[in-house]
Image (spheres, coloured by chain):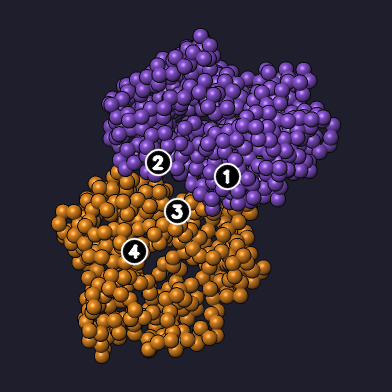
Amino acid sequence: MPRPTPFHDRLQALCTSYAWKHWSGYYAVCHFHESPEREYNAIRQAAGLLDVTPLFKYDVVGPDAGRFLSYVCSKSVARLKRGRVTYLCWCDDDGNILDDGTCWRLGKESYRVTAAEPSLYWFEEHAEGFDVAITDITDTVAGLALQGPTSRDILRQVCDIDVDALKFFGVKKTTFKGGFKGHVTRTGYTGDLGYELWVRNKHALALWDLLMSEGKAFGIYPIGLDALDICRVESGFVLAGVDYTSAHGALTPAEKSTPFELNLGQTVQLDRGPFIGQRALKAEAERGSEYAFVGLDIDWVATEKVFAEYDLPPSLPAAAWRSLRPVYRGTRQVGRAYSGTWSPILKKNIALATVRADVASPGTVLDIEITAEYERRRVPAVVSALPFFDPPRKRA
Amino acid sequence: MATHYDAIIIGGGHNGLVCAAYLAKEGRKVLVLERRYVLGGAAVTEELYPGFHYSVCSYVVSLLRPHIIRDLGLPKHGLQILPLECSFTPHLDGPGLCRWPSADKTRREISRYSKRDAEVYPRFGKAMGRMARAVKPIIDMVPPDPTSLNPFELMKFRTLGDVIRKLDDEELPRFVKMMTMSSADFLDEWFESDILKAPMAVSGIIGTFQGVRSPGTAYVLLHHYMGEIDGAFRAWGFSKGGTGGISLSIARAAQAFGAEILTEASVAEITVSGGRATGVALTDGREFTAKNVISSCDPKLTFLDMCGEKHFDDDFLGHIKRYRYRGSSGKVNLALDRLPQFTCRPGDGLHIRGDIAIAPSIDYLETAYDEAKYGQFSRRPYINVVIPSLTDPSVAPPGKHVMSCFVQYAPYDLREGPADWENQREAFGDTVVATLEEYMPGLTDSILHRQVLTPWDLEKDFGLSEGNIFQGELSLEQLFFLRPAPGWARYRTPVKGLWMCGSATHPGGGIMGAPGALAAERMLKERAL
């Protein structure tokens, strides 16, 4: 049975839809009311508040903490300064991705790593010979993502840090109004202006109540995972378990992917001391990747035409979809889309897909399978650079 | 300033801008002249009180054509539409009625008043949706000329024939009924509860000088089912930053395509020589020349004021003079210190995030019309309220709100003449606030600023003759190939090189953009520039 997060009492009272799902063994809200639409708009127009407690969190502390992380991950943290966060991933020996997450530097010898999947075993197994202690704090630290254009104004009301000084991918320890302590990271998974706030479980409800009351004037609204999913597709963020399968969970080699194939090349630093997967990734970098992760802009006029053949208006799922859809170039299947959504802000029907590298340059016209009135059809989809949506405030 | 343009567009409203954008996109040299300091015409946002951004006139959007959004890349230029979530009709006694996006929730709401209506309601929606889809091609076509013998013109009537043919045995009679009946009568055929019919019936009278029991108003109901947002029919929304946001995104698109836009450039005269429009002269003395002049203003301003009667024959002038405006609505915009509370449904729940209709019964609406018929504004008017700051906090300071109130009836022709609005403006504003206060006690005390727009103000400040929000009534006899005049529905005018592209042309008013786009299409096709 999944367990409740420390915010559950508040979420349960608000979740009139009863639409819950399981997220890493916790209850998580899909959407609070009939549809995720209002929550999506809160993220893009005001501020959304999302319980992200189920993310796996590890404290990595010790004289060798930095060296250890640089060894396990495909990116070095040697240059990561105190008070900074970086996005990275870790791979197996063959350079296949295991998971992606953030790494914060909290002190000289102190880091925190977030992950989508349980990673303690993998970290500990490779910690041998490093003077480092790894603690799983997943169940003791609660997290809230505060995302959207008014999130900064809200944050200003609730904590004592100089909010403007906290730059994109920064982390700061703070005392919240009410006297309890925690961390604020200038991070998020929405591609918008946003923060994530972290406190010990016992302060969770106080943090929730504080944000909801101080945020009211700024249009704060609780959001669930469905709204988040629309935003993350617009922002081109991969999702472990959806857009890629962790090499640990893959049943066949074909199910595995490398960071390069997932458009995560910026998280790979090859020319440095040894790290797990280095040889394979170097070889791939020289050889070139077989696949690429791209955006697809699905032709709306063609979609309308297909539906019109059945005398129907085009119908779209109310939320983002997550199902494999074949992608073709002519008659040849060249890839598959994993997730997609109607983007309300871009007014486009978009998808995230893995396609063969030779058809991955932006502007290439491919075909994607859609279903219209129980029949499989194909419509054109143009390869598009990621992210689809990239407002200046994301980095502001 | 000696530049010669391919096209000068008079009026920087959304239609003028759409037309400019399409022409500029095709590489034409285009100049847009806007009389006011701000773009948008009646689709405009203004900060009239510090921190509060009013959608001064038009306040919701649904009919903006999706292909225009795509063709001009408007999202890239800042267009954002936020959904209006529900339709709330408060009552003085009882909980009122709220129609939600969720069919089940709506059924439960309606069944408080009538179980039968609750089940018929989705069937009605489906019927209207089908009909709206069938009629939709008409909106997006240049009206054919019924008097033409040109086979290409006659072919277009096939499209109309197809529309009719697509309707089945139930739908065809229904369509004819819609074209002829009053909205109240039409709804009577479907529903029994007044509280449901009243807010639905008002769709048929918005912007017209008719009542819910006037024949012909049922058709306009259909217009309101034609709205599309993201391809979904029957969806209404707000524009981020107010409706001016729509106009500004179109303006940015037009500029990106190379169009020039001037504000505070008031056109005094369209210069005509040898039966051909040659340019414009501004009130400040500046002059611009062009191959074509396109007016997004209404026929009265365009033909009678800017061109002058001497360029037209009596027949045409007769049509233009008979074209009816008869503005019947006003607007009250409020800056609020706090959210209003409804007696019938307290709390700041979801019911106030959509549109709120003060339309408690059919009789209430018809009584409001009765007063207007004899030259008075309604003592208890129909009011359509929205509070966009709930969805888009950027339009008001934190914790404060803007409230937009569309008010009908406010007849242009008061008993003492339209100029008497100068004396009655504040009394009209007081009436609106007093009406709302009955439903939302304490509202008056929370008002920080009030803007009252009467039809007289709409005419003076926004160039809408007689204050008609659609540049001429959207009644059957003024639609399609009759808009604005028989024989002149195809954006051309009797003066060569002078074109129309505003709401006074097919398919009419509302933030659709279709007149602007169709005019541009027509001009390009006729190689006018």
- The answer for how far apart the CA atoms under marks 2 and 1 are is 20 Å
Residue that carries the numbered disc 4 in the rendered image: A167
Residue closest to the eye, B328 or B398: B398
Q: Amino acid at mark 1?
A: Ala
- The answer for how far apart the CA atoms under marks 4 and 2 are is 26 Å
> Circle 2 marks a residue in which chain?
B
Q: Amino acid at mark 3?
A: Ala
**Residue drawn 47% across the image and 64% down it:** A236
x%, y% of residue B421? 48, 16
Secondary structure at badge 1 equals: helix
Rate crowding at label 4 as few (under 14), some (14 to 19) or many (20 or more) other CA atoms within 10 Å.
Answer: some
> Circle 4 marks a residue in which chain?
A
**Residue drawn 29% across the image and 81% down it:** A66
**Residue drawn 26% across the image and 75% down it:** A111
x%, y% of residue A197? 27, 60
- The answer for how far apart the CA atoms under marks 3 and 2 are is 28 Å
Quadrant of the rendered image containing residue B342: top left
Residue A319's disc number = 3
Quadrant of the rendered image containing residue A62: bottom left
**Residue drawn 29% across the image and 58% down it:** A163
**In the picture, which quadrant includes the C terminus of chain B?**
top right
Rate crowding at label 2 as few (under 14), some (14 to 19) or many (20 or more) other CA atoms within 10 Å.
Answer: many
- In the rendered image of the structure, the colour used to display chain B is purple
> Circle 3 marks a residue in which chain?
A
User: Which of marks 1 and 2 precedes in the sequence?
Assistant: 1
Residue that carries the numbered disc 2 in the rendered image: B395
- The answer for how far apart the CA atoms under marks 4 and 1 are is 34 Å
Secondary structure at badge 2 equals: helix
Residue that carries the numbered disc 1 in the rendered image: B251
